[in-house]
Amino acid sequence: MKYNTQRDKLQMPEYGRGVQDMIMYATSLPDKAERQHCAETIFRIMACMQPQLRELPDYKHRIWDHIAYISGYQLDIDYPFEINHLGDEAQKPEPLKYPMKNIRQRQYGYLIEESLRLLGEMPEGEERDELLALTANQMKQSLFIWNRDAMDDMKVAVDISRYTKGRVSLDLSTFHFAPVQTLPRQDSSTGKKKRKK
């Protein structure tokens, strides 16, 4: 008995080992007419296996590209289309560089800290007041999400003053926070949301 780990690697797992074996068999046939007939039969099988491809305008071309790719471009037949080499597409792209930012307090995140930096540079006025209100409400929401025990209006006001180096202060006697948006808790055993009684 042969295990899959002992067999050739599947070039396109979505078609399975049976299709790959058929294509390799077609490649080994000595007569070109036989190879052609075999490849056209395999094409019809593959089209039935992947019906979603039929919604694409060039699905026939794609399947012939797949046949050529699975054969390692060794199947010598008269293809009805010019074959595109899929080797470059199959390679994994280079990982994106993640912008590493120095975040002082993780519960706020980079965008809140950037908003606070802008607040410290803005002149007094309606625009700054609007940004202050949005930022303060988001800070309180973030504190609620990260640690409900640390959610405190005074902490938000102190953090705003500290981040802006005292240039902006939140007057808690006049400022009214928006209600914190809560999500229903889930029952950890079933994953279902608990209903309030």
Image (cartoon, rainbow, N blue to C red):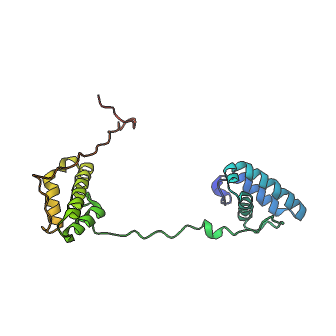
**As rendered, which of 1 and 8 lies closer to the eye?**
8
> Taking 81 as reference, is 178 above or below it?
above
- Across and down, in percent, residue 138 comes to 26, 55
Q: Residue at x 34, y 33 (%)?
A: 194
At which x and y percent is residue 190? 40, 35
Residue 31 in view here: no
Q: Which x, y percent locates residue 86?
A: 66, 67
**Residue placed farthest to the left in the image?**
173
Query: Position of 161 compared to 21: left or right?
Result: left
Q: Nearer the viewer, residue 35 or 28?
A: 35
Residue 88 as seen in the image, left or right of residue 188: right
Task: Locate residue 32, reporting x and y percent.
Answer: 88, 65
Left or right: 189, with 34 as reference point: left
Q: Residue at x 74, y 54 (%)?
A: 19
Q: How many marks?
A: 0
Q: State which quarter of the image contains the C terminus.
A: top left
Say which quarter of the image contains residue 134: bottom left
Please identify the residue farthest to the top as the structure is shown. Answer: 197
Give the left or right position of residue 141, taking residue 62 as reference: left
Asked whether residue 149 appears in the rendered view, the answer is yes
